[in-house]
């Protein structure tokens, strides 16, 4: 049958829906929808200032997107830039706008450098990183780890094997590299053969 | 204080950190009682969001008690029990003055494309989040709201993001009476969106996911039809058949960056971080919506590019609407819906973990074990 101007199939009965579903149609009128219209000039916000006071900076310069003309009046102070990862991140903020892929890709590189540096540093601390407890995998006890994963239709199981590699893989790789480096330093080349 | 801290992709632990201090005259310090783990926290946990720093404390859904206020704070006081929207916003910039609270221009020094969010990397401003004993709450006169006496704590907690975002997503879809709505994703936000589609007067609501236990929850608590896309060969074709060949009038995309259903898309984004997010659900939404229909996107993506089927969206005349939810705008009407018995946001919650076991909570949520839908962290 060719398509007609009518919507195919039986149309739902509003009375049946109202009887079956609590609150059905309570927001039918767009005026009852708080997100309508999207922009509501003059909406009450609780602000009692036209221009917010400037939060003082502590320590060094706070990085900012070069798309901002000035530092925002309020900003987060968690985890200030530091070390090599900090220099990479600072370069990404200072050099590239958010429209440049290089901005984001450099920030991702900064993340990985930060992560590797933190792991190495933790090895020399009283509380070294522990990929087992920190991954939370021990929480699987008593929470049906096998039957949960065997539910029909779970398509994430096709790539679930990648997760442990992503968690433990860098540690194994770092261990192998360290071992080879150590061996190269300790043993002369001819004895390694 | 004790706080969840990020230690790299898939790894976190509870550490002792200095308590936050008043940094700005309109700051407050809130002692956290309940926090939740959001599906979008998993994007951080999996290392997908650029500039997520080691030591960062996640958590943008929390309630608690005001412990200290800055000298200019006048709308909340010490001892008030407050619910805090995930948005950090000034209330006075070009965007806030128009109600676009999630797009505030005065709180995120690190980016202009997104506003401020608690505990969501430096890309959203570099604020530590609420999965901790204490949290700094900027612009305390604007964001937090006192929890009404007749609203249960866990309902209030769900209104700080998950339920408010789902409700907002249903509104973005611009539903008219009798519309057929498809919701991709039966996570907490998708379930809230599905439930909210009925409030807007939808005639049919169909929820799509690959987790049977979540689809059962959609049927039982959101009264929807369901399809498990892992058990059909072509979900787009199934949905076309279910809608007489026309497609759905509206589609809500409540999945975001780690969408499954296409191994290459998922692995290149969620595992290898080569895309800002896996656009599988978004592409299905484009293919599923009828010509001239509306797609509402409330799934969260990273700032990098994604391989989206934009040609089909243009050729079909689709309207794409999206935003982070301006949460506090939703509250007055949602309080009315809760009081009238139309919705019960805390029904989303399935698991509760003490702060000391938060690593386990993330792992169970990330791995979708034990029929988990929404985990809550008990802090106090």
Image: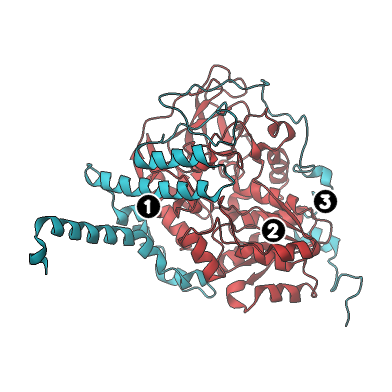
Chain colours: A cyan, B red
Left or right: A189 as drawn, with respect to A166? left
Q: Secondary structure at mark 1?
A: loop
Asked whether, in this view, residue B229 is left or right of residue B241, the answer is: left
Of B196 and A173, which appears nearest the observer? A173
Chain ID of residue with mark 2: B
Q: CA distance from mark 2 to mark 1?
A: 31 Å
Mark 1 nearby-residue class (10 Å; few <14, some 14–19, many ≥20):
many
Question: Along the line of sight, which residue is nearer the eye, A157 or B221?
Answer: A157
Residue beneath label 2, please?
B252
Label of residue B300 in the image? none
Q: Residue furthest right?
A: A5
Task: Name the outermost residue toward the bottom.
Answer: A1
- On residue A28, the disc is 3
Q: Position of residue B35 (x, y in %)?
A: 50, 43
Question: In the displayed structure, does residue A7 sit left or right of residue A154?
Answer: right
Give the numbered dot on residue B11: 1
Residue B78 placed where, x, y %? 52, 23
On screen, residue B239 above or below B121: below
Q: Are marks 2 and 1 in contact (CB under 8 Å)?
A: no
Q: Are marks 3 and 2 on the same chain?
A: no
Foreground pick, B182 / A22: B182
Left or right of B378 on screen, residue B297: right
Q: Residue, x 54% and y 60% (percent of image)?
A: B258
At 67% from the left edge and 20% from the top edge, which residue is drawn? Answer: A48
């Amino acid at each position: 049958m060719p398509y007609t101007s009518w919507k195919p199939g039986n149309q739902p009965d509003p009375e049946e829906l109202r009887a079956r579903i609590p609150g059905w149609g309570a927001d039918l009128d767009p005026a009852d929808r708080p997100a309508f219209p999207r922009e509501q000039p003059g909406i009450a916000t609780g602000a009692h200032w036209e221009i917010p006071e400037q939060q003082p900076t502590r320590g060094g310069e706070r990085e900012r997107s070069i798309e901002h003309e000035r530092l925002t009046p309020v900003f987060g102070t968690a985890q200030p830039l530091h070390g090599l990862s900090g220099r990479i991140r600072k370069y990404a903020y200072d050099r590239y706008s958010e429209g440049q892929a290089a901005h984001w890709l450099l920030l991702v590189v900064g993340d990985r450098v930060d992560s590797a540096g933190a792991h190495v540093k933790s090895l020399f601390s009283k509380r070294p990183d522990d990929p087992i407890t920190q991954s939370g995998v021990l929480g699987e006890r008593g929470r049906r780890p096998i039957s949960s994963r065997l539910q029909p239709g779970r398509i994430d199981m096709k790539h679930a094997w990648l997760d442990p590699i992503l968690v433990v893989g860098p540690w194994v790789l770092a261990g192998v590299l360290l071992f080879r480096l150590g061996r190269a330093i300790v043993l002369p080349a001819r004895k390694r053969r | 204080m004790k706080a969840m801290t990020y230690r790299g992709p898939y790894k976190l632990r509870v550490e002792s950190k200095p308590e936050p201090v008043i940094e700005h005259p309109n700051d407050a310090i809130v002692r956290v009682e309940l926090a939740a783990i959001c599906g979008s926290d998993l994007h951080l946990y999996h290392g997908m969001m650029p500039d997520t720093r080691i030591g960062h404390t996640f958590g943008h859904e929390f309630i608690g008690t005001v412990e200290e206020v800055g000298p200019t704070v006048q709308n909340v006081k010490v001892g008030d029990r407050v619910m805090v929207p995930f948005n950090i916003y000034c209330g006075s910039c070009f965007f806030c003055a128009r109600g676009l609270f999630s797009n505030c221009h005065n709180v995120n020094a690190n980016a202009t494309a997104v506003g401020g969010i608690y505990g969501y990397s430096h890309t959203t401003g570099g604020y530590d989040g609420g999965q901790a004993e204490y949290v700094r709450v900027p612009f305390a006169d604007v964001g937090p709201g006192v929890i009404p006496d007749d609203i249960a704590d866990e309902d209030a907690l769900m209104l700080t993001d998950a339920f408010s975002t789902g409700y907002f997503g249903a509104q973005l879809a611009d539903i008219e009476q009798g519309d057929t709505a498809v919701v991709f994703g039966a996570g907490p936000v998708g379930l809230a969106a599905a439930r909210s589609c009925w409030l807007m007067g939808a005639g049919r609501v169909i929820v799509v996911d690959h987790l049977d236990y979540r689809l059962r929850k959609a049927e039982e608590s959101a009264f929807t039809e369901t399809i498990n896309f892992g058990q059909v060969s072509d979900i787009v074709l199934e949905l076309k058949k279910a809608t007489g060949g026309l497609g759905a009038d509206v589609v809500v995309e409540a999945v975001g960056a780690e969408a499954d259903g296409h191994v290459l898309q998922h692995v290149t984004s969620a595992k290898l971080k080569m895309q800002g997010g896996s656009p599988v659900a978004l592409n299905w939404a484009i293919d599923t919506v009828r010509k001239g229909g509306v797609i509402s996107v409330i799934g969260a993506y990273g700032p990098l590019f994604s391989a989206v089927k934009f040609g089909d969206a243009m050729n079909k005349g689709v309207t794409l609407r999206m935003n982070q939810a301006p949460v506090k705008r939703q509250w007055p009407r949602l309080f009315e819906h809760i009081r009238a018995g139309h919705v019960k946001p805390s029904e989303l919650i399935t698991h509760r973990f003490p702060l000391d076991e938060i690593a386990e909570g993330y792992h169970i949520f990330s791995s979708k074990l034990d029929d988990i839908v929404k985990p809550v962290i008990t802090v106090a």
